[in-house]
Every structure is written in structure tokens, then in C-alpha cells.
Image: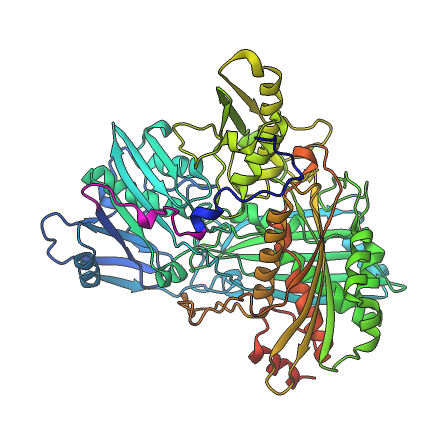
Amino acid sequence: MPATKIGDKVIRVDAIEKARGEAIYVCDMTLPDMQYAYMVRSTVPRGTIDAIHLPEMPEGYYFISAKDIPAQGKNELWMILKDWRCFAEDYVLYVGETIGLVVGPDRAVLKDLRDQIKIDYTEQTPAVTIDEGISSVGGPMFPEKGSNVMCELFCQKGRPMEEVFAEADEIFEETLTTPYQEHVHLETNSAIADYEDGKFVFYASAQCPFYIRKSIAGLLDIPYDDIIIRQCTTGGAFGGKEHFPDVLCGALLIAENKIRKPIKMVFDREEDTQFSVKRHPSKCIYKTAVKNGEIIGTEGHIYYNCGAYLSSSFVVLQRGVFHANGVYTIPNTYLKGEGIGTNTFPTCAFRGFGAPQTLFCFETHLTHLAHHLGVDPLAFKMRYLAKKGDETTTNGHIIEDVKLPEMIDVITKESDYWNKIKEYKPGCGRGIGVALYNHGGAFTGNGEQAIIKGHARLTKTGDKVEIFVGSTEMGQGFRTTLRKICAATLGISMDNIEYKNPDTSKVVDSGPTAASRSTMVVGRLVERAALEMKERWNEGDFSTEVEYEHPEGYPWDQATFRGDAYLGYGWGAVIVEVEVDKLTNEVKTLGVWSSHEIGKAIDELIVHGQVNGGILQSLGYGSMEKLENKKGYFKQKSMSDYVIPTSMDFPKQFCHIQENPYPWGPYGAKGMGELVFNGASAAYVDAVERALNCKFTSIPIPAEDIEEALKNV
């Protein structure tokens, strides 16, 4: 078999089994004496639990609650902090909070038992929106703080904003908002708990197996090694299975500890839509100082709705604040972020991890400022493009060549942008919009070297090599990418490389499958391990293992959030052209042109799939994915009322990949899974605004919102 090369076009290793329906998911698995579980959840957004009325439980059926946590354990899940309770007791903080499980062998009986359980509450006034959270409607959720502020940080660069505003000719101020977004992964949340040889074993649809183990061990106060997580074929995640599997597995652990039979829990689609984490809604208030037609400074106050528990919100907020000036170098900036606690389902990771919110808001803010100044938005933005050596919002520096001018040149020519902006007069029904964006690769600041400390191990047996890492395939093509990196480095065929779904008792912890780090960081670890193995190839059967090494000379202060937050960024530019029917307010997208700089594409087919999917998901975020929380309850509950785009809603895309090899990535590769989401929503809104000669400061903009906007034109 010929050696695999990085430039080769290969078939995804999991493509055939998935296309044929042969892949085995959690819902397909059945173990001997299988039991089933359903969650009993809070039906009010805030209040005390006065009583729980249980029906008579038939033999072999159980109600599991906080009372079943042993005395040495604690009712807490360890995510970033330990504030998320496994089971609510005494009080509830949001609709859908887990109060208990019903467990038994027959699912029909379980559903009937669940429906018979009655819970008495004394309801309290909930805070649901960001504004209600800020004003602490119903009283502060955190009495010791006297507020609902869960987390906060700020970044400052240049002169004090008071001085900058004092010398400005004008201050352009806007408030922009972004909504919830549902992940809509093809496979709903699911997990199975079992007990084997004195250890608790979980089969999980999950992104981060080692996260689950760490999160739930404290419930029983047992060592991590007494818990084994076996990641199963995972039908999509987008961040929704980063921390949320902890919630399923934590409750199942308590049930398994009592029952000692395999227990399976699978959400149906409506359950998954109503009772799972979402993207953080945001509110961004920008004030931009202008002098002689030029930006001299920007102040941004950024609020994210965290829901009732912190989950990953502080880290999400950090990335949002660090990306709040987009791809631009503004001489003077002050950016403050606050995570607001509310009585809503906790928000968590979603593709882009906080960056899409601020990138949309600032990109749209600059577009509106350009129109206000009477200049073309793209020409205006190009004055401020970041360059190598420029200071970032965290007082670090851009350490790579920024290829945005070349990328802009490609897509403006392909789309005929400069001619179309002359041809399409404001309000003519046709518009063309543009957005520029970036995404910091890997974990922020000291995350990789101080917190994660990722490892990778390769084992050679004869002429076969197996990869042992905790990183997961969740539809993004990583099993193919990692095998390709390993094979190309060793100079052998991919067919001789094995990379199975991780089992925490067998693989090393390479860190979470998140933060656009898998190829960039874990791929580099595997490349290094393969280089070492190649040198020793003739020694027989052996293993090599490497640990993450952080490049020197790039400081970061975690206490002050100052320094080089990221050692490399992915960069993107996208143009969207639309036609709007002014009678029906329907928008037809005529063209999408994008360029992305991701260092080096390990597999161009996988990259094109990521680009097409990410941009489509972003267009849905900006155009149609309406998810509202009214008084603590999600209004949209199913795929019939939460609308996502399909391939029929948007045209074939033009995709350009700009090479700019990254020195610390495998074969020069950087992360790109999140980058491709970050810009299309702003470009879409820009195009619709030009077509209608109106302005939007929030997304999405379905037909009814367009109709409202036209009333003000």
C-alpha cells in the first residue's frame, strides 16, 4: 500500500458506515438486563420545593434524587466551578432543572410514573432576560454579591477613554443583541451507565470524555479511575456535548450506584430542544469615537446571559471580550464583559464559543458607522485591518502575517463586489454585504500549558500503529485528519493506522475536543510522537508518548488577562448577496463567497465540508433561527417551530483557502472548525440592510422582523 501524503484526497474513514446506517450510536445499544431512565424536571423557573408527591412505585422501579447521594459525596458537578447541582433540592433555579430520575425496565411504565409525580412549589419572580438579570428582578440570585453578575473582566489598551471621547468630533453609539441558538445535532443527548469489575462505566455521546469523569466523581467521592467513559459514535455536538453530558452522567451515576444494572437515557427531540444548553444571548453596547472621519477609540460593554449556573460561561465571556474588536486594530479600547445569571436553562459552549456574538455586533457596528460617515463599509474597514506586530485587546501582539488583503481581493473579484455596490442602489431590493472575522486557535491564555497539558501516545505493533488520545470524532472528520497526519509523518498508509473512539481507561488525556484545538494542538502532538516513532521504527513493538510544549516568549497573566491570549488566529472574509421580495419580505440568497486562512489544509475535502456547514449554520443564526425564552420557558420546542436552514435555502458556495503555514501546527495547520461560523451572519444582515435601505441591530431577521423594520424606513 502506498504511503499517504497530506495532499492526498482520501475517503473519510467513517463515511461508509454512517452512509449505510451501520454506525452504532448510544440509542442503538442494548446491554443485558437493560433499565431505562427519564428525568423529572422543574416546571417553574424559580421557587422553593415544598413537597414531592410520588405514586406507588412498582417493584423494580425507582425514583432517584439528591437523597440517594451518599453522605461522603456532594451534590455538585465540577465543570469550570462546582455550582451546577446534579439534583435540585429545596429550591429550583430554572425550568427543566433535574429534580430526579425514574428508572426501571419498561419505558411506557416509566413515562406513566413520571407523569404522575406532582411537585408543590412556592414560586418566586424569575429574572429571564439580560436586563432583568442586571436589575435583579425578583431579588439577586447571589445574595452574597447583591447582584446577578456571575463573572466579569475587562481589557484596556491605549489612553483612558475619557480623554479619547473628549477629543472626538462625535461618538457613535449602538446597542446590538444576539439570540439563543439551538445546536440541533443530528443525535440527541444520550448515555448509558453500567457497573463492570468494580468500576462505573459510561457509554456516552460526548465531546470530552475526561471532562465527564472529572465532573461526576465527587458525587460519590471516588477516584477518577473508578469511572470509565467510553465515547460512542457521536452524531454531532457543536459544543452542546462539551459539558452537558455531565448532567446526564451525573444523575445516572447516582442511579447506577443504587441499582447496579445498566441504565440507558436518551432524550427525544422535543426534550433535547427544551432541556439542553444553548448559545449565550448577548447584549453589546459600543461607543466609537471618531475624529476627522477616523476611528480613534472604542468602548464596549458586553453582557452574556449565563442562565442559572456558570457552566463554561466565564471562559465563553473571555473569548467574546478578547474578540470584541474583531480583525481590527483600534488605537484606544476599553472592553468590559459581564456574565449575567438568570432563571433560564444554563447556556454553554456552542461553535465559536463566545466569539460569534461580539464579532457580529462589532462588525455590524462598523458597517453602520461606515454608512453614517457615507463611505463603503468594506473600504472603511480595510483602513483598520490588523497586521503582524499590532497590539491586541489583551496587550499581546499579532504574531503572524495577516493575509486578509489577499483574501478580500479574491472574494471581491469572484463576487464582483465593487461593481455591484455601484449597481445596487440602497433600497433597490438587491444587496451585497461583507464581513471580516477571526478566531483564536486553542485554549485562551495559559489554558494549554497550565491547565490541559495534553498528551498523545502511539503504539506500534508490527507494521500497524494505533493512536491513543482522548480527542473525539463528532462529525468533523477528526478520525480521518489525525490518521492522515500520523501516516504521512511515518511514511506509511492510512490503512495501517488505527484510531478508535476513546476509552478513558485506555487512552491518555489529550484535552477536550473544543476550542479549535484538535488539529492544531492534538494533531501536532501526534505528529511529534510519530516523528519519534519514525526514528525508532526498526526497534520492534513499542510506544511513544509526548506532552504539550508551549512556545517560549509569549507571556500571559491569567490574573489580569494580559498578554498573548492566542498564538495563532484563523482569519476569514465572506461576501453574501441577496434579493428581497418587498411584498412577502422573503429573502433569497443569490451567492456566498468566502476565503479562510487556516494555516494549511490537512484535507481539503474535510475543510470544504466545514466551510459549507459553518457558513450555513451562521446564515441560519442571522436569518431564521428564532429561539425565544418567555418567562423562563423556551417558546420553540421542536423542529416544526425552530427553523434551521437546509441546502435548499442557500446557494452553492465559493470557497477559497488561503495558505499561511503556522509554525506550531502539524504541517502548518491551524484550527478552523469555529472560524467558519463567525462571519456570515453579519454579511447576511449587511446585504439585507443595503437591499432595503434599513438598519437591524439584532438577529435573527426573519420575514416578520423585516416587515417591522420597513415600517421605520
Q: Position of residue 653 (x, y in %)?
A: 66, 62
- Which residues make up the magenta segment? 19-34
Residue 534, by quadrant, is top right
Eyeballing the image, is 387 above or below 641? above
Q: Position of residue 457 (x, y in %)?
A: 51, 25
Residue 422 part of the magenta segment: no
Residue situated in front as seen by the camera: 581 or 16 = 16
Residue pushed farthest top? Answer: 539
Residue situated in front as seen by the camera: 298 or 417 = 417
Residue pushed farthest front? Answer: 1
Q: Is residue 462 visible?
A: yes
Residue 26 part of the magenta segment: yes
Residue, x 56% and y 45% (percent of image)?
315
Eyeballing the image, is 664 above or below 683? above
Q: Position of residue 508 (x, y in %)?
A: 47, 27
Q: Quadrant of the N terminus?
A: top right
Residue, x 73% and y 74% (percent of image)?
431
Predominant SS of the magenta segment: loop
Report whether 551 appears left or right of 204.
right
Residue, x 49% and y 22% (percent of image)?
459
Residue situated in front as seen by the camera: 13 or 599 = 13
Residue situated in front as seen by the camera: 259 or 432 = 432
Report whether 22 appears left or right of 557.
left
Residue 442, by quadrant, is top right
